[in-house]
Image: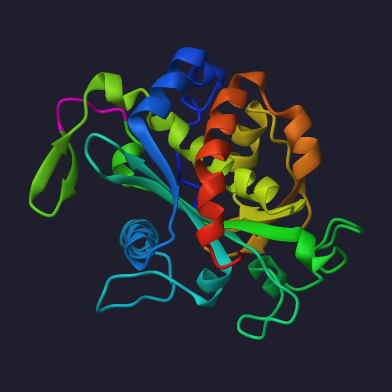
């Protein structure tokens, strides 16, 4: 499940993808895999803030620690993007990667919990594809403070510290969602997966298509925190169709995340 309220549609366009803005995005953010318990806790807290506190989704909550997590987190690679100057977590996303023989959770994707009747594409369904070649992008969450372009006002409260973002810094906010997707897309390639699924509201696939990532709808409407559909994209096809403007960012993320893969559960 990807949060639908990630960015403004008017901001998520090719104007944000020109070389100068891509370079600025690379310079101002850290891209990393959550390989420590503390890093994972940061992701779980952000998910709690976005999904439960802000969007009021009915999801499992660790009330004592204010986490949102589920049984698939132990079989996922968690990608995080952090704003360098402030040290604030801008967003997180996970790539669920089932392994044959798993019993907790079973060797299937979260989207398969919807059943074969709703996943109605004749061929593009995880029920008919090799499990070790499939994965699912889910739990994409972006801090509320990186979904606006307000300037000279408090943008983030971290404990008692008020953090201000300048107008210049705010120009990169619209790239956070795309950056998170590129992180998971990089992991797909680095782990030799091919078949990628995601459950999204219709707006997000349309926005990703602007950058060359053309998802195929593979389900009936699914009522899950609003009306969504399951979508599919082939890694190899997507790599060929990716906007040329994004290649430097993609290559930078691959170079950054590649050495970190060795420390994940899949190593």
- Asked whether residue 248 appears in the rendered view, the answer is yes
In the image, 204 versus 250, the foreground residue is: 250
Please state the horizontal and vertical placement of residue 241, each as a whole percent of the image: 75, 28
154 is higher (above) or lower (below) than 198: above
Q: Quadrant of residue 63?
A: bottom left
Of 263 and 152, the residue lying toward us: 263
**Horizontal side, residue 164 vs residue 76: left or right:** left
Quadrant of the rendering where the N terminus is positioned: bottom right
The spot of residue 160 in percent (x, y) is 7, 52
> Which residue corresponds to the image point at 74% horizontal and 52% vertical from the top-left?
192
Please give the name of the residue rendered at 38% of the width and 63% of the height, measured from the top-left corner.
36
Residue at horizontal 35 percent and vertical 59 percent from the top = 39
Residue extending farthest bottom: 103
Q: Nearer the viewer, residue 141 or 51?
A: 141
Picture residue at 60% right of the left edge, 19% below the top: 245
| Farthest-out residue, right | 122
Total labels drawn:
0
Camera-side residue: 187 or 95?
187
Range shown magenta: 149-153
Q: Is residue 208 above or below residue 72?
A: above
Percent position of residue 254, x then y: 58, 39
Query: Percent x, y for residue 180?
Result: 50, 43
- Tell me if I can see residue 1 in this picture: no
Name above or below for residue 117 compared with residue 201.
below
């Amino acid at each position: 499940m990807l949060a639908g309220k990630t960015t403004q549609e008017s901001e998520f366009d090719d104007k944000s993808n020109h070389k100068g803005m891509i370079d600025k995005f690379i310079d101002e953010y850290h891209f990393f895999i959550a390989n420590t318990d503390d890093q994972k806790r940061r992701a779980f807290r952000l998910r709690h803030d976005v999904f439960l506190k802000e969007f009021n989704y009915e999801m499992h909550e660790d009330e004592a620690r204010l986490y949102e997590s589920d049984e698939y987190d132990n079989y996922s690679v968690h990608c995080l993007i952090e704003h360098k100057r402030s040290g604030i977590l801008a967003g997180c996303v996970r790539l669920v990667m089932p392994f044959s023989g798993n019993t907790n959770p079973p060797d299937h994707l979260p989207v398969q919990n919807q059943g074969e009747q709703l996943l109605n594409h004749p061929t593009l369904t995880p029920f008919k594809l090799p499990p070790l070649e499939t994965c699912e992008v889910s739990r994409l969450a972006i801090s509320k403070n990186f979904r606006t372009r307000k300037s000279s006002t408090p943008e983030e409260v971290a404990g008692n510290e008020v953090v201000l973002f300048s107008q210049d810094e705010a120009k990169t906010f619209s790239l956070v969602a795309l950056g998170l997707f590129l992180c998971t897309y990089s992991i797909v390639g680095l782990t030799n997966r091919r078949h990628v699924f995601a459950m999204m509201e219709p707006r997000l696939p349309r926005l990703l298509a602007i950058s060359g990532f053309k998802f195929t709808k593979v389900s009936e409407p699914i009522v899950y925190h609003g009306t969504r559909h399951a979508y599919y994209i082939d890694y190899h096809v997507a790599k060929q169709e990716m906007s040329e403007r994004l290649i430097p960012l993609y290559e930078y993320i691959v170079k950054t995340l590649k050495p970190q893969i060795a420390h994940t559960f899949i190593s």
